[in-house]
Structures are given as structure tokens and as C-alpha cells.
Amino acid sequence: MTARKTLLEQDGVQLTVEEAVATVTLTNPAKRNAQSPALWRALAEAGRLLPGSVRVVLLRGEGKSFSAGLDRQAFTPEGFEGEPSFLDLARGTDEALDAEIATYQEAFTWWRRNDIISIAAVQGHAIGAGFQLALACDLRVCAEDAQFAMRETSLGLVPDLTGTQPLVSLIGYARALEICATGRAVHAAEAERTGLANLVVPAAELDAAVQDLAAALLAAPRDAVVETKALLRAAGGRTFEEQRVAERAAQGRRLRDLAGLGE
């Protein structure tokens, strides 16, 4: 058994690795794991530090809430210490504003890499940026008390941390529009019914359920899982014929590899 190693612990984010499973934990329960640019940089760094041996990444939040979203200090004139305030960014050039938001988005993109499967363990509130962070993962396992809400529109903003595409893909355009435009809460039962959550369990069973799912995902050969994830992620942007071609190519690679003829 390989000992668990801590590879990162900064700005409310901890990354630990044990064999083929990495765990990213939001570690500021006193503020319900509210998010900030510093936390986003730490999340992006966690993705860069991920060893190549990792196959499954678990994302969790300490305390009663997964993440209550963006720290409201971001909207004050002073913002965060050592950071440009959002108001200062708004007064800058279009290019600078676009570049800064792109940097924030890096924290939400690496979870979709084809070489890993990411699982969000969601309890309590997953609001705004917290909702989008859960959407960044491939799978979501929720406690019965989980509540999702996209509050950006209510604040005069839009969801800009890569959450709109997976939300529409999971639950459809009409339902996604209604949830985002109203900012209403989506409780765990609805999340499971609509496909937003893969599984809902009692809060006391959340960690065990996530560990069981991770173990099941590790049972199949890694390369087969990687190829399958790549096929499924790209399917929505391909025609039926294009997907047939991609399936044949992927299967050819798998058969050659199993026969010992791979590159």
C-alpha cells in the first residue's frame, strides 16, 4: 500500500495522492469554501501537479457546504489584498479583462482531461462558482442535503467559469436556462432525476459512496477507459458517421495494443 502524499496545501486547497487516486479538498469550511482568485490559482496548480499515475480525481469540500460560491469580497471596491478588484478589472482594457477571466477559468478546465475521471462529492450548498466547479467534474455524487444554484444572473453577471456547456449537455437547454435565469435552488432529488447528479446518498454515506465509485472506475484497464471517455466527450460535436469512424479507430488501437502490436 502506497502512503498518501500531500502535494499541495495553499489558499484553501489541498491535493493529496494515494496510488491511482488523487483528492482535491477545499479547506476553508469557516467561509463555506468560498472561492477567490487565489483559490482558483491553487486549483489550477493542483491540475499541473497531478502525477501521471493518477486515474481518478476526487473533489470535496470540508464542512457543511461543498462551496458557497465566489467570496463576496470580490465585489467590494478594495477586493482581495494583493489582487485587482473586479471593479478595477472592469475599468481596464477588453484584452486585459478577457485574459484575467481566462486565467480564472483554468481552475475549471483540467478536470475534463481524458486521462482522468473526476468525481465531485457534493454536500450542502454548491452555489455559483461552486456549482460550476461541480459541473467541471465528469461525475457528481451528492448528499441528500445538496443544493445547487446558479446565482450569477441574479447578480447581473453570467456563469463564466465553464459551467454553461456541461449544464446544457446534462439537463438540456430549457431547464438550464430556467435554472440560470431564476437562480433558484436545485435540490438533490431533482438533480438526480434530471441527470445532474449520478447518485444521491445520505450525508453520512457520501465519502464511502465516492470511494466505491472510484474503485469501480479503476477496475477496467486504463487505456480502455481513456479511449472511451474521449469518444463520449467528443460525440456531441460529431455527426453519426464521424463518430462511427472515431469508434473504429479507437477500437483498432485497443486491439493492436491487446495483441502486443501497439506503438
Image (cartoon, rainbow, N blue to C red):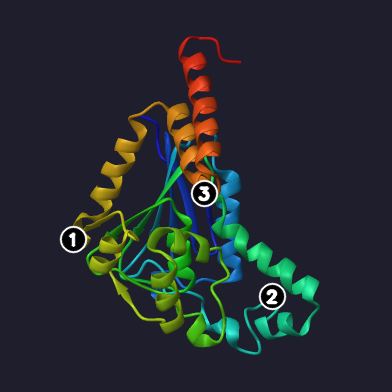
Circle 1 packing at 10 Å, graded few (<14), some (14-19), many (20+), is few
Q: Nearer the viewer, residue 213 or 159?
A: 159
Does any portion of residue 115 appear in the rendered image? no
Circle 2 packing at 10 Å, graded few (<14), some (14-19), many (20+), is few
Looking at the image, tell me whether mark 3 or mark 1 is earlier in sequence order.
3
Q: Position of residue 194 (x, y in %)?
A: 30, 63
Q: Nearer the viewer, residue 129 or 15?
A: 129
Q: Position of residue 67 (x, y in %)?
A: 41, 69
- At label 3, which amino acid type do we have? Arg
Q: Which residue is rendered at x = 53% and y = 37% of the image?
A: 241
Q: Secondary structure at mark 3?
A: helix
Q: Which residue is rendered at x = 55% and y = 63% of the image?
A: 162
Residue with the most extreme bottom position: 77
* C-alpha span from label 2 to label 3: 30 Å
Query: Which residue, given by chain and number where applicable, does mark 3 sit on?
Result: 112
- At label 2, which amino acid type do we have? Gly
Q: Is residue 126 left or right of residue 187?
A: right
Q: Which mark is residue 202?
A: 1
- At label 1, which amino acid type do we have? Pro
Query: Which residue, given by chain and number where applicable, does mark 2 sit on?
Result: 82
In this view, the mark in front (2 or 1):
1
Q: Which mark is residue 43?
A: none
Q: Quadrant of residue 218?
A: top left
Q: Is residue 236 above or below residue 223?
A: below
Q: Secondary structure at mark 2?
A: loop
* C-alpha span from label 3 to label 1: 27 Å
Q: Secondary structure at mark 1?
A: loop
Q: Total number of numbered labels?
A: 3
Does any portion of residue 186 appear in the rendered image? yes
Q: Position of residue 211 (x, y in %)?
A: 29, 44
Q: Is residue 7 above or below residue 253?
A: below
Question: Which quadrant would the N terminus be assigned to in this image?
Answer: top left
